[in-house]
Image: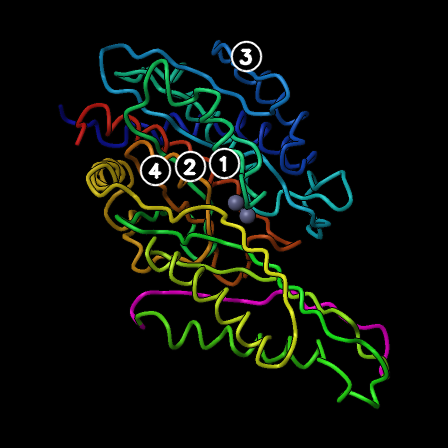
Amino acid sequence: MAIVPEAWTPAARRALPAMRAWREAFHQEPELSLEEKRTRDKVVAALTELGIPPQTFAGFTGVVGLIPGSADGPVVALRADMDGLPVTEATHLSFRSRFPGRMHACGHDVHMACLLGAAAIMTRGGRRPVGPVKLLFQPAEEEGRRGGALPLIERGCLDDPKVDYVVGQHVEPNLPLGSVGWKTGPFMAAADFFRITVFGRGGHAASPHQGPDAIVIASEIVNGLQALVSRVRDPLDPVVVSVGSIHGGTRNNILPSEVVLEGTVRTFRPATRDLIDRVFHRRVRALAASLGARTRIEYLRGYPTLVNTPAATRAVAEALRVEFGRKHTIEVEHPVMGAEDFSRYLERVPGTFLHLGVGVPNHPSSLHSATFAPDERALIIGAATLAAAADGLQRNPP
Ligand SMILES: [Zn+2]
Ligand SMILES: [Zn+2]
């Protein structure tokens, strides 16, 4: 079945005032992972207003909606994340955060408004989807370990009706406003975390010979970890090992009895992820032992690699090309080392994760920064993207 060109964008443009109001309401009251209660209430109110019965969960802030299809097409789930970050907003927006120390600095306010906008144009815009569309409002994407996708999946968001495809998107300042980025295969990294405690003897800094010096050994470990990246894995297989914090000691002439290092490991291939995990433990223990110190290593697995299903991604990219034109539908060249728990859905259901361009020339802006302020025109593209992606997958299932 052919797709009607420019099918969704005009309707999305008409939905802008509603999307703007939703986005501003979310933005003003950001909430941290798993605390998204006001946010959930706003989502519930918006869905109710759209005539979509919201499904909520005791003790969990996720919300699921279902738009029935006009025909028997496949079931497509569209997902938006809900949480803000512990950042104090420094924008001059009229609708900036009312809560010091909390901000929608990752654009999840935009994601939710786009998903509500997509729901609005699929229910009121004249064209109904040809199959059921599930709306997944997912908390705790920023939490990093267990995240919010797994608990939502455990609560049955991919069942009844069983979801055939899943689509999500994230605002991306490196792509121009008005464009959408897509990529088949591995797109975002697996993220693991570590905490290494190095136990030294502690004592007078003038007598370092009396026992293992936790500061010196921690420094050796920081350098040794970089050799993991450069000498253990295939140079064509991206890996990042970063130490993000080092804590130890109180003053210049006292050697601390322990130093704590914390950091993150990013990988793409599952085999590389396991390899780095193994070699990491071996290397850290051996380094410390060779210098006479004991260590405790905590190594936690975070989100898995996000792998876009090739066939579903190409089907979505084709729908977006018809919707926005070839120039605005950009194949992203390289995967990114950031992580996303959208990967949890893609481990279970085919689908794709897209990047929504919010980049504006001469306005440097980065995710998680206190000045991040994506342009509201992205709401139009974001809502049309989700609707067109669902429609494309339902009319031309790969
Ligand atoms: Zn983020
Ligand atoms: Zn984010």
Marked residue nearer the N-terminal end (4 or 3) = 3
Q: Are marks 4 and 3 in contact (CB under 8 Å)?
A: no
Tell which of 270 and 313 is nearer to you. Answer: 270
Q: Report helix, strand or loop for mark 2.
A: helix
Residue ID for mark 4: 347
Numbered tag placed on residue 43 in the rendering: none
Q: Residue at x 63, y 79 (%)?
A: 219
Q: Are marks 1 and 2 in contact (CB under 8 Å)?
A: yes
In the depicted structure, whether residue 69 falls above or below residue 77:
above
Label 2 sits on residue: 382
The quadrant of the picture occupied by the C terminus is top left
At horizontal 39% and vertical 52% (from top left) the residue drawn is 188
Q: Residues within 10 Å of mark 2 (few under 14, many from 20)?
A: many
Image position of 232 (left or right of 394): right
User: Magenta span covers which residues?
Assistant: 235-252
Residue 371: give x, y in percent of width and height. Answer: 64, 54
Instruction: Of the two numbered discs 3 and 2 on the same chain, state the one appearing first in sequence.
Output: 3
